[in-house]
Image (cartoon, rainbow, N blue to C red):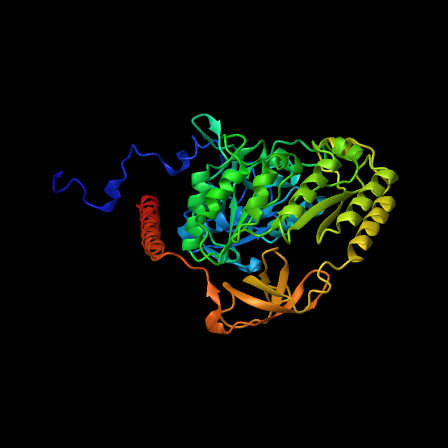
Amino acid sequence: MVFMEENDIADIEDLISSEDIKPKERYRNKKNVTVRPKKAVNGNVANATTEPEAKKIYESVIPGTQKIYVKTWGCSHNSSDTEYMMGQLSAYGYQLTEQKDNADLWLLNSCTVKNPSEDTFRNEIEHGMSTGKHVVVAGCVPQGAPKSSYLKGLSVIGVQQIDRVVEVVEETLKGHTVRLLQSKKEDGHRVAGAKLALPKIRKNPLIEIIAINTGCLNQCTYCKTKHARGDLASYAPEEIVARAKQAFEEGCCEIWLTSEDTGAYGRDIGTSLPELLWKLVEVIPENCMLRVGMTNPPYILEHLEEMSKILKHPRVYAFLHVPVQSGSDAVLGDMKREYCRSDFEHVVDFLRERVEGLTIATDIICGFPTETEEDFEDTMKMCKKYEFPSLFINQFFPRPGTPAARMTRIPADQVKKRTKRLTDLFNSYYPYAGREGQVYKVLVTEVSHDNLHYVGHNKSYEQILLPMRKNLLGSCVNVRITSTTKFSMMGEIIDDEDEWKKCSLPVKQQQQSSVQSQKSHSKMLIALILGLLAFIIQWLWRHF
């Protein structure tokens, strides 16, 4: 024990020495923070630009007194990043709101795949700035093009820096600008990103989205995502499995694996996607399911035998998203997709033959600059041959900075005609026709877009709409198909409610989850107390 003289600390102000760093000096060593310009007493502003509407500037930020509005564009990887950022902000004490007009700060997580999504992102920034909101941007757009004019003066959270969202939000509310775009490294090597064990607020509390890797091994000529996410970097299998176990303990009953290319997982760390999946199925509780994310053809070809076995596992959806983009080898070569049409068809044929009820989803880009009428006919023939139940049809968009953006474009009217022809083909067949009366076991995890039904999925990950009965969400039930549409089936529940099955966790895991929850609440309370103490000290320092 250390004893002090009686008058060593007469008051709380004595905790601050004259030699301590001053508030204005604390940012000198923070290269990522640009301190806001100060207003002069006479009202003149030095080195500042005029704002459309004045923002409220907080000299000190007490968690819980500001509201944050969060919006996300893009893929499930982006959605997972947003859920992590929301979890950290909430744990620190910030209030999250869906009412953008009542928020003090907007956190906008962007997607760089298509022009329209970036356009709406830019419009949202301009709207927020014009109404006096603090704006923080995240995601692939600012990471891939940080010098864009409309991002000037904004705080930026890079795709690998989402674990520092609290720091960025706090400084932005004080009027400062923070830009964190660096890659994360451990022992000098680039890693996949922030730790997977961070707190999270899920958009759907029943579904956990786990990013198993970031970046990819390709350099497709039309894609800008590589500019943002970079080369392949995989999470360790142990970290992914631990996150899955944590999610099940927290009440999730469905896991989605996501990344820019799940098939390439592990090539940088000496493992593979099948090895990871076999470890994951060991920890999936009964009546819970796993969905494997998008994989490009080149990196799944060597794993087809193992993937067929995994997709037949009772707790893994028989579903795979394999984007082909074109049915023409010439176009695939110009896209630098690193496979040919026969490779893609081999993937589909091999897996369909071995996995009963397999659903294959794919993507097509219409109007790539070098696509001829003959090339497009090859695409039409392929899509007619397989009649994919899920077909994502996109018009080509020239993304700035990509090789394809420098190619001579096809006239817009031709691109629209091709898009319409393929869309008409897709709408001409009904994959669920004749299913009336069939019985399926489904896991119910979602609410339909019109809020009129619950949504369940069978083993093939086919969408089945069900009545919104109490306690049905999160249940595994048997249903009979009553009608079908182009995109889904309607069903009636044939089990009594006492026969509905919930995701079951071992008692030991439930107890561990309770202990972890108590620890999390304790850490949150300590953080709030420390934040309040820091505010009191700063206030006393300024006024005395």
- Residue most toward the front? 354
Res. 152 visible in picture:
no
Q: Is residue 506 left or right of residue 261?
A: left
- Name the quadrant containing residue 138: top right
What residue sits 49% from the left and 43% below the top? 278
Residue visible at 60% across and 36% down in the picture: 228
> In the displayed structure, does residue 54 sit left or right of residue 329?
left
Q: Quadrant of residue 462?
A: bottom right
Task: Locate residue 201, reporting x and y percent.
Answer: 47, 54
Q: Quarter holding the N terminus?
A: top left
Q: Position of residue 294 (x, y in %)?
A: 62, 44
Look at the image and tell me in which quarter the C terminus lies: top left
User: In this picture, is 155 found above or below 356?
Assistant: above
Whole-percent x, y for residue 212 in the image: 52, 41
* In the foreground, 365 or 328: 328
Which residue is farthest top? 188
Residue 344 screen position, x and y as percent: 70, 39
Residue 291 appears in the figure: yes
Q: Total number of numbered labels?
A: 0
Horizontal placement of 181 versus 438: left or right?
left
**In the depicted structure, whether residue 72 falls above or below residue 341:** below
Quarter of the image for residue 10 reads: top left
From the viewer's perspective, is 13 left or right of 110? left
